[in-house]
Image (tube, rainbow, N blue to C red):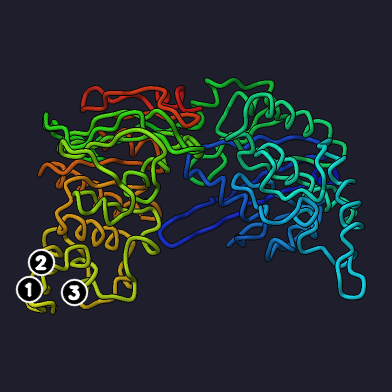
Amino acid sequence: MSNPTNVALELVGVDKRFPGVHALKAVSLEVRPGEVVGLIGENGAGKSTLMKILSGVYQPDGGEIRHDGKHVVLRNPTDAGAAGIGMVHQEQSLLTNLSVAENIWLGKEKPFLKGGLIDRKAMADAARKQLAKVQIDVDPYTPTERLTFAQRQMVELAKVLTLEDEIEGHLVIMLDEPTSVLEQAEIDVLFARVRALRDRASFVFVSHRLDEILDLSDRVYVMKDGAVVAEMPAADADTEKLHALMVGRSRNAEYYKENRQVAYRPEVVMEVKGLGVDGAYEDVSFQLHAGEVLGIAGVIGSGREELARTLGGLEPTSKGEITVFGKAARLGSPGEAVSIGIGYVPRERRVEGIVGFLPVVANITLGNLKAVTRAGLIDHAKERATAESWVKRLAIKTPTIRTLAMNLSGGNQQKVVLAKWINAGAKIIVLDHPTRGLDVGAKEEVYELVRKITGEGVAVLLTSDTLEETIGLSHRIIVMKDRRITERFDATPGSKPDQLDLIRHMV
């Protein structure tokens, strides 16, 4: 590490664990005054966790954070701001029903109070000074909802720069995927402002677009599986080198039960033509066959998460056609999806997948109550027999079927969600990051289950945290970038693409 006086922000051996996940593993990183540090890695590499620790949302379990050479404890975002650390969020934090000035000074209104009321002229005048720093010409009284996305990004940056007047030390500004929905001309403006502000601040730039990382950054850190695996000057790197560092390891065919991957059936159970959701993705077309695992690969902002939620009935479409089992389908709600044989296993299983305060038996039968009711009342014997059958069939580890779902492990909760949808008659399952937060053993059990249900003809649409998992489980893979499909790959055993093949079409 450099001498502390030459380092604006430093992480030393920072560690973070969540149940079943070692999210950060002794991460050390430094940001020097006036420099732009690029931070890259696959989805799930630990970038988001690192950013949340630096912004005070999470606290580390080990290691140290130093700002201007001094140890700091960031217990919340207020502490981070007091240390001169701010973030421009990918999913913007501005309140669109407030004016530009109100957003810039949100939570910092005290200097503008007169007799208990806000002096809006004084607030607007102060906001103009902040807007001038990022060279954006908008009226501070303008409702934020009227601004373009690019203008809002500049307002976010102006808001972060208010820290300049509050602290003596050097500012460190984190840019979290700031270009994901910007056009090239808007990106050029943003980059120009970042370069112009380097005398006032250092930047940590997180992006999946490696060409942008190389263009804007002075140095690049590469993360994989919660650890920093490389650090180098941007001038010494190229996209191929960064691709290889991001992928790192080889795929384990046995782990993903590839020997049990059987050919899918010719029957088309779902066909999508020209599907789109305004601002999320466009012109998506594909066929899904009985017994097939169709992987959807892409980085955050590519549109794949929104596509998965559309097909689960949670994100209404703006255009295009969906045909399910040969009939036109309108997936306006999860209920409509379920009624035509589609089940959705969400990434946030504790929030959207299970009802934690209900027992396992109720969670399994919840998707098909008609099958266990008689004269409008639940037939408890039938309900118990149904649940016990699924517990045995899917090897769900639970003390009893009366155990509350919230008390099961993550992997067994995921099995309960799958049991619910298959019991409800789902022939198409949307798996949205199905192994997120699971340990290695629990992941392997989910892979075993995927092989089991697809062998019985159930079709699976898969979005995953890692390319390794997507390749290992899928029969075919669709790659998305910038809200469109950019490539398609065969992924049957013996024809699996390399991770680098996919990354070339993702970033």
Circle 1 crowding by C-alpha within 10 Å: few under 14, some 14–19, many from 20: some
Q: Which residue position holds label 1?
A: 382
In the image, taking residue 188 as reference, residue 443 lies left or right, namely left
Label 1 or label 2, whichever lies nearer to me, is 2
Label 2 – label 3 distance at C-alpha? 18 Å
Q: Which residue position holds label 2?
A: 371
Which residue is drawn at the image coordinates 7% and 73% (left, top)? 382
Label 3 or label 1, whichever lies nearer to me, is 1
- The relative height of residue 412 versus residue 233 in the rendered view (above or below) is below
Residue 37 image position (x, y, % from top left):
70, 36
Residue type of the residue flagged with mark 3: Ile
Q: Secondary structure at mark 1?
A: helix
- The relative height of residue 507 versus residue 418 in the rendered view (above or below) is above
Which residue is drawn at the image coordinates 64% and 38% (left, top)? 178
Residue type of the residue flagged with mark 2: Ala
Residue 281 image position (x, y, % from top left):
45, 34
Q: Secondary structure at mark 3?
A: loop
Labels 1 and 2 touching (C-beta < 8 A): yes
In the image, taking residue 299 as reference, residue 82 lies left or right, namely right
- The relative height of residue 489 versus residue 437 in the rendered view (above or below) is above
In the image, taking residue 105 as reference, residue 457 lies left or right, namely left
Q: Which residue position holds label 3?
A: 401
Q: Which quarter of the rendered picture does the N terminus lie within? A: top right
